[in-house]
Amino acid sequence: MEVKDIFSYDWSYLLPEFIILGFATFLSLLDLFAGKRLGKQVIGWLAFLGTVIAAIFVIINMNALDKPYSYMIDMIRIDDYGNAFKLIFLAGTAFAILISLSYLKSGEIQHRGEYYYLLLTGLLGAMVMASSADLITLFVGLELLSLSSYVLVGLRKKSQLSNESAFKYVVSGSIATAVLLFGMSYVYGLTGTTHIYEISFRLAEAGMAGYQFLVYTAFAFLAVGLAFKISAAPNHMWAPDVYQGAPTPVTAFLAVVSKAAGFALIFRVMMISFFNVSDGTGSGRFFFEEGSLYLGLMAAASMIIGNTMALRQTNVKRMMAYSGIAQAGYLLVPFVPPTSLFFGEVIFYLFGYLLVSFGAFAVIMVVSREQETEDLKGFAGLYHRSPVMAIAMSIFLLSLAGIPITVGFFGKFYLFMGTLVVENYWLAAIMIITSVISYYYYFGIIRQMYMRPGTTEAPMVVPKGIWTFILIMAIATVLFGAFPGLVTDYIQIHFNPSFDFGNMLSPSSQ
Amino acid sequence: MGNILLSSLVFSPLLAILVMSFIPGRHAGVIKQVGIFGTLPALILAGWMFGMFDYETANLQFVEKHNWISIPIGMAQAGTVFAFEINYELGVDGISMPLILLTAIIGTLAAIASWQIKKRQKEYFILFHLLLIGMLGVFAADNLFLFFIFFELTLVPMYFLIGIWGYGEREQAANKFLLYNGIGSGIMLLAFIVIFVIMRTLNMDEITAILTTPGHPITEILTPEMRFGIFLALFIAFAIKLPVFPFHTWMLRVHVQAPPSIVMIHSGILLKMGAYGLLRMGIGFFPEQAYDFSTWMAVLGIINILYGAVLAFVQKDLKMVLAYSSISHMGIVLLGFASMNTIGFQGAMFQVVSHGFISALLFFLIGVIWDRTQTSLLDDLGGLAKSMPFVSGVLLAGGMASLGLPGMSGFISEFFAFLGLFGRLPVMAAVGAIGIVLTAVYLLRAILKTTFGPTPGRCTGLADAQPMEVIPMVVLLGCIILIGVYPAVLGNPMQQALKTIVPIVTGIGG
């Protein structure tokens, strides 16, 4: 393949990225020059507007393209796989901005302008991670997201906890990045290219040529490095500290957008690169045998560690962090090995997780703000003080636990189906058992809200904006739980016809 | 057919929920009235449908079917999209119709018994009606997915009803309930999804048809070992609910800690969901495997009978006596199933309905006694016959029904169950029959201790039953005697449905 003249591409397909980039730049300049005069809310609303416009262009792209569009040998690649993830990132960032608008009023964060455009640059990083098939671009996207997140986590400058968690995040994040790069260097060393589709063929040749051990080593390092972003075992240790220390909207951003980006990357890099490598016996494919088994062990470990450690937590954000580790474990299940249900499963589950996480974190934010503690006991008697908040929170928790009729239940049902189609009974069994264990701590919050007396009976004051947001999330959680077909059909109609494995796995024709 | 009769029945409690949610919580009296009258639509519809029910056919009646969810597999083959379909399917046959009526009757009576609820009446009745929807739905569902959703729908309200309105150790009881039943549901879900991915349908009738057709193409995938595995999973799932011996501890706690009105529901209906599932799915889907397993079922049944009876004899708490008595009586259900013939099945289903009425009556009486004496310990009770002759009389009658006095429903069911088993496993039946003697011993001990003998101070000068309390007693006792003297009222509708299961079983058993 030869590189075309840079102006011969139709750059309009990159509009979503350009818009986010433009808004980030514009907002930083605006903050710099007019920050004093403008209300900080304005910057927040503009950032929100940016995500909405970008989302519209993503949808336009989805309709306009019926096959992947590639820039510079897949340096950037617009396909349905990426578009689906991008919609999730954009929605996640938009939600983070919405819940921040009321959160930041308290003046806890001194640098509000930075806050919003760092969210946007993080988003841009995530979007690049979802729409590239080249290790270099992917890595740049990953770093853009990571660096933005590091700053966001430490944004509560006056809070020791926030500083501590930012520091931990930077250190452990850098180590993970180093591990990832180390893995990538093996891949590059074996193949001499960073183009994932090229890698796919050359790695297979390298495997045949007796470098199998190096191929496996590369796989292991990549897996461990990528596990960091999705906070899956064995690279999950940072999550509780960081989730606890970060401002709550940032925690939600990390839990959803950053995690989803990690999943987008894992599939793109791991699956495609190693697709053609044959396994040790030469009769099957490495990725579908040992490789996915390795990911399956990661999934199992994450589910077990996340769900059992969460039992002991008294800080609700730490608990959500362990819950998030477990959720990462569930989300790894469709990778073991990927089936034709894979895409629908992952997108549906992420969609549900998006609604539920933001809902739950919004409630946590309101409650911990009002009670001035993030302890579980802060939820005591919530039902008597604000029934709507308590009921909404219960819905989110039931969804995380996977109890009908919520979007989380169908998500898990879908995952079960996917894993039982390939007769992975052991993974399904672990998923079931750990899910039941998780009931205990999810219902721990519910117990506090309904069955324990709070320190006060006075009605809780919830800002109107966030109240509406939480209510909408709760309704959506139940609605899509009762009619999951709305989402599965959307995925089927808008993504699947042009998305299948053949399309995904082969380089674009241009 | 545009038939929505069954849906209206199942969802009729929603009406009461809707009305109640607009009544402020402080109007406890109004809420109680709405709560009680809100159960009437279901009762009237159930009674009407029972009247219209056609005894002559084994087919499902009042069938409803709508498309609900489709899960695309994503591979379009020759232009058609291949998808897993999940439909909304309701229907009743001769087994589920009586159970729906039972549910509706006990639902109304338990709502009347809930008159004694003294705190947070609004929440109580809303949850109560949600529970009612779940229970009605379980018996009306003709689709495994729907069945599972309704099954789980009973879980969450029960958790709250035990945990908020129970006695001293209510929260532990609620947790134990949740975890045990969570495991049960998890195993059940696993079995359902395995069935789903292999057979591509969740409709119970279709599954039964596929599984019981000799030489169906599915046989190649579904080896006998696999069939046995699924059967065993279903058996364990429903055994936890029933409960069968090693899985019974949660149920004791619930019986002791939950408020009397909820124990009426729990003992009267929720345990029966286990029996229903076992017959409909365990035996109905896998008759061959059930036949092979039936000796074990009989053994477990005998353990249940004897273990329950012996332990009931040494209990100091009247509630515990009845809880163990329930275990013992559920053993008879297992024996009936183990007989694998029409008479035995009929005995088991009779026992299910009859025990539903009897235990609801007995627990209602315990509630009445507790209301006056604040105790249910046998040592603290005595001589109630003097001050509460009516209550004592009904208690004695209920006890007689429970120990199988001819002319009451308990006799008929035990007679049929043992008659069935004697035809197949005479030794087992003989051993099991010892349980009947023990039942008489422990029940008479407990009831005589309560109603006669020395009268402790707290048991003097108590008010006899109020009109509000007389209604449930009379209705329940009436049902018990009606089934006792005219068993055809129950036998006729069941006849055809049981006849369709049995030939398959005996055809295999020879």
Image: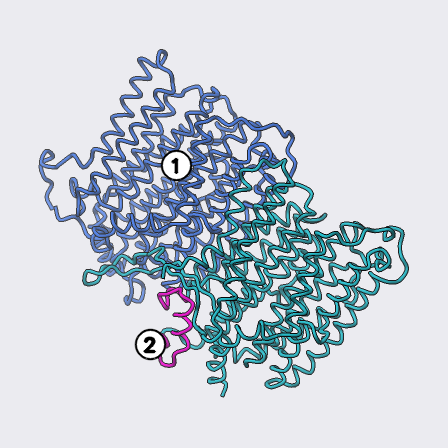
Chain colours: A blue, B cyan
Secondary element at tag 1: helix
Majority secondary structure of magenta residues: helix
User: Identity of the amino acid at label 1?
Assistant: Ser
Question: Which segment did they paint magenta?
Answer: B195-219
Quarter of the rendering containing residue B307? bottom right
Give neighbour class at mark 2: few <14, some 14-19, many 20+ (Cα, 10 Å): few
Q: Quadrant of residue A169?
A: top left
Spot occupied by residue B75 in the image (x, y as percentages of width and height):
25, 59
Is-magenta flag for residue A437? no
Label 2 residue SS: helix
Q: Quadrant of residue A225?
A: top left
Task: Decide if residue A57 is on the left or right side of residue B59.
Answer: left
* Residue holding disc 2: B217
In the rendering, at what x and y percent does residue B419 appear? 63, 82
Nearest to the observer: residue A7 or residue B2: B2
For mark 2, name the chain: B
Q: Nearer the viewer, residue A67 or B18?
A: B18
* Residue drawn at (27%, 51%) of the image: A492
Residue A174: assigned label:
1
Identity of the residue furthest to the bottom in this view: B510
Q: Is B215 a magenta residue?
A: yes
Mark 1–mark 2 Cα distance, whole angstroms, equals 56 Å
For the question of whether residue B297 can be seen, the reply is: no
Identity of the residue drawn at 29% across and 33% down = A124
